[in-house]
Image (cartoon, rainbow, N blue to C red):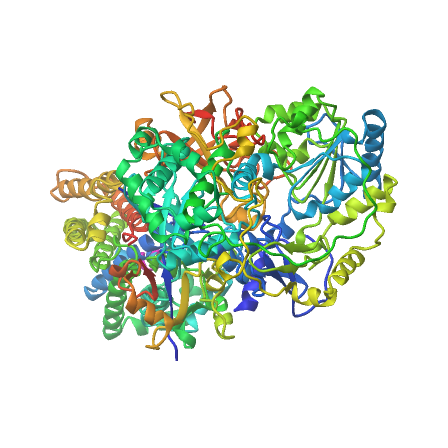
Amino acid sequence: MARYGMVIDTRRCVGCMDCVVACKTENQVPEGFDRDWIATDTTGRFPNLHLEIRSERCNHCDAPPCVDCCPTGASHVEPFGHVVLVTPEQCIGCKACLASCPYDARFVNPDGFADKCTFCIHRVKEGLDPACVSVCPTRCMTFGDLDDPRSEVNRLIESRTHHALIPAAGTSPRIFYLT
Amino acid sequence: MHEYTLARHNDLIDPLVHVWNWQIPSYLFLGGWVAGMMIIVGFFLLRGRHREETSVTGVLPAVSVALLSLGMLALFLDLEHKLYVWRLYTTFQGTSPMSWGAWILLAVYPALLAVFALRPPDVLRDLWPAFDRLSDRLAEPRMVRVIAVTNIFLGVGLGIYTGILLSALGARPLWNSGILGVLFLVSGLSSAAAFTHLVARDRGERELLATSDNVFLLVELGVIALFLIGLLSGSQAHAQAARLVLGGPFTGVFWVIVVGLGIVLPLIVQSLTTAGRLAHTALAPLLVLAGGLALRVVIVNAGQFSHWARF
Amino acid sequence: MAAGLAASAGARPALEHVSGAATTEKGIRKVPTFCDICFWKCGAIAHVKDGRLWKVEGNPEDPLSRGRLCPRGTGGVGAYFDPDRLKVPLVRRQKRGQEEWVQTTWDEALNVVAGKMETIKTKWGAEAMALFAHGLGGTFLKHTLKAYGSPNIAAPSFAQCRGPRDVGFALTFGEEIGSPERTDIRNARCLVLIGSHLGENMHNTQAQEFAEAVGAGASIIVVDPRFSVAASKAKHYLPIRPGTDMALLLAWMHVIVGEGLYDKEYVAAHGYGFVQFQAELEPYTPEWAYPETGIAPDAIRETAREMARYRPATLIHPGRHATWYGDDSQRSRAVALLNALMGSWGRKGGFWTPSSMDVPGYPYPAYPKSTKGKVDNPGSRHRFATESITTGIREATLTGQPYPVKGWMVYATNLINALPNQEETIRAIQALELLVVVDVAPSEIAGWADVVLPESTYLERYDELNVESFREPFVALRQPVLHSPHDQKPNWWIARTLAGKLGLQAYYPWKTIEDYLDHRLAKANLSFTELKRKGIIRGAAVPVYFDDGVEPSFPTPSGKIEFYSTQLHDAGFDPVPKYTRHPEPPAGSFRLLFGRAPMHTFSRTQSNPLLHDLMSENEVWVNADVASRLGLDDGRYVRLRNQDGVLGQRIRVKATERIRPDCVFMVHGFGHTSKMMRRALGKGASDAQLITRYKTDPLMGGTGMNVNFVTIEAEA
């Protein structure tokens, strides 16, 4: 079975937030909430600056603390693609998973359950890319199987310098940012 | 120069995580307090104190059940998907401290009720004669020992669990310390001792508990020191988390309320009391209890404030 | 999961369904159309799930979007669901601008409009009625107004935006840049952005091609007082002192000509007046430019050589919003000339040659001839204006010269925030006998109207065909996806019905828009049915570069690229651009700069719930050192006060290294004051409110707006 991940080219990304709004419409994310978002880091002194723009979301970690801490099994690793998902009907809304995520990727859906990026598993099952990837005007995002040595994601990881977010938290995130 | 911007605005998450409000600290405090009481009750049972008319062993189980129920109510109030709370008991999740806690709580009630049943109030005996027979069966020395050990065992488990609940959440460096379980256990013991000391009618029990509370408070100071030293010697994120109470925004409340008023001052007052230089008053125990609550509030809030460097 | 998510919309609904009507429709329906959240007209496919609008995606067949919309297009769904959108025709009840309305029927509302228009025509002549219309949707209202007898039709997109650029390029190459711009960004090996924050301004095709160029390792040179997103992708970032771009352009050309780095063959073949041009450049050394621009001579030389290294695939982007300092068409001409030196016009990686399909217009009767001529540019004082000047109409409305203007119809443009000096606009409005606003959202200009006519969103209407002029020819259809949720009507219906009430039925021989579209398409041998199914019909690809067969042609008076412009000389202007120094902000003041954010269009989208969610208010960018000196923490609310004492709205400070200390920057379009725009009301600040001064471009009447200075006042 695949182990899905994403590679995002921060050199191409302009931070337009199309990924954010596409997620909102595709998944009918409640107003006021974000399953994905844009973060920027600016370093240096004017005019010698470096700016990194990142489209961020749940990292679908290989060692997901949100799944470990869930008392009901609502947060789980889906066998399909090792995607981290929440089953709303099993979630009691204890928010341990929100507190456990170093990326603050989760929120409480107004209906009470923990909510977050699903890697658009419903689309992936149909052979489509996640909504954020498929709309990106800069084509900065690549989605694919990290276990497939010939996949585009692996090719990019191998050929470009990259980093993941907060590796020190030990969660083995599966989104890689090309620099 | 480093500027970080985040275009996200999730309720309870941004700009700073604040998923837990008063309910969780209250629950952790009450849970720890009950844990301490179970250990004390178990200890007294082993000493045969339950046979004494004036012993607190008659009072503590009922109080514990009430406090624990309050704690669980607080926990329930914190749930966002309340109607699904039963889902806790259709599964056991071995990696989840909360799942452990849910099942421990399920065992804590019968253990406390067994102590309660050792000396049920007369009303109950009159109402339900069978209760008498049950009491007699439980009062057999072997059964008492089982009940005592079970209470101590569950008390330690419950006390530590209230800390592990937080320390398992590695995303918040302040919580990310195994010592937190010990700290909350010791704090729970000191709360329990303070409370028992406050309500004890038996002079001997009162003296013993006041003295033990002093020990617990001293140990707690030591554990706090270890907790902070541990964080400071950890990663940059952990050290930064420790600085939240060492010069950061939680410094005042931590050192003045939790340590000063909640530990050091009652320690001084109780030491003077046990030395016979002050009369027993409610002051020290109340300060200890307030300090115990404040400790959970500060740790829960500061923990949510602490985070890993973003990249 | 999907079902759970859909069901979860209950507590705090993702988007309230504005239509109360129950639907029995099941399944997913896909309707191809094209977007209208900005003017780029990207091909889109709307998805309706179980009768409810779900999402809008790019149409892969569309050369503009190439299957991917920008955030505004993706957020187009929100335009339909916007609870603040105009719902029924409104007639003013109180004084103008009080926003007190009587809801009425279309018949009533259009009777009022037609009645007033008849009166104006009788009293002042048909020319006293002007139309301000932005975008393709204005086509039919323009037709009605022309049939009525007025030539006075303008859009802020000329004098407040791209006019100087198009004039500057037309004076040089004989042709305009057009929209969508004929820039070959994706093939550029060196891309120079001077005053364009591409990526933050989200012209879809261009942003896509920009990312492609970045990805392909093109050398990017960005000139901007602000470290824009584009600047962060640049090999060379030149933090220019605002107002001195012309000095840099001239110095670059000085180096390129002086060092013989230009495309000599190209210039020899196509250039006119190069010798005079060369002589004019003499004084503009990099050393001269340094104190003007703040850019070191070495950096000027290095970037000039960098450009030359990659020519002809070196594209100096002409920009779009070019109305800055009043000498903007001359500056744009300098940009054009720099491109000419690179030989990039007509070449791969420079400027392609657009083509379009031949779709004849509908055969209408001839319009009545106006004897008075246009009102906006009396005596052709702006000799090189190629379109009507909005501010010229405003001036005529205020002065009655050259003749009175008594009625305005405004379609899809928020004049209050689009024109400089709001006070002047409002005074002009007070002098009117009729102000009609046709729009989707209740913008500020709607608040001043006598009659407000609610238009259907693009998802609910047919519209004029988009016969695009692009790097490949195609024709696109906008068609309704859903019914309008309230009593909104499409622009063609409004224009046609109004014409009927004005007795101009003869100008609308077609009964329905379908008849109209079918007729036009049939004339071009295209199938309406096919277009409805596909949304887009592409024509045969044609050559776009000189090198693959386009015959070089420069429709200037000399028939060549005019390095020296005889027309300008004859009209008394500089035949080769010259540098003029613009006033600097006084000590303690900052030049007010404004620009775009990728998720908003003008001041039109702030109440769109989805786009509002992405960016709900703007910030004022203040240099971090300046902010610290002024004691302004990041995120703190301030107000800006301009040189004329106008105090702006509350706005948060973004204290950042990413801007020079002598200017401040804000995203345009915020600070709404319309009470009907509830979601956006009072959020952020309007730059337009602070733009009380503007400098008019003598060549074409554009209004340079970067000439206002502000101080920063902390909010308590």
Q: Where is residue C571 in the image (x, y as percent from the top left)?
A: 57, 28
Q: Quadrant of residue B266?
A: top left
Residue at (69%, 64%) from the top-left corner?
Answer: C531
Query: Which is more toward the observer, C193 or C6?
Result: C193
Q: Quadrant of residue B46?
A: bottom left
Query: Residue B304, image x and y in percent?
Result: 33, 50
Which residue is rendered at x = 82% and y = 34% of the image?
C112
Which image quarter: residue C339?
top left
Based on the picture, tell me whether residue C42 belongs to the magenta stretch: no
Q: Which of C367/C201 is in front?
A: C367
Residue B77 seen in the figure: no
In this picture, which residue range is highlighted in magenta? B59-63
In the image: residue C561, left or right of residue C251: right
Q: Is the magenta stretch mostly helix, strand or loop?
A: helix
Residue C146: x %, y % from top left: 77, 39
**C427 with respect to C661 (left or right):** right
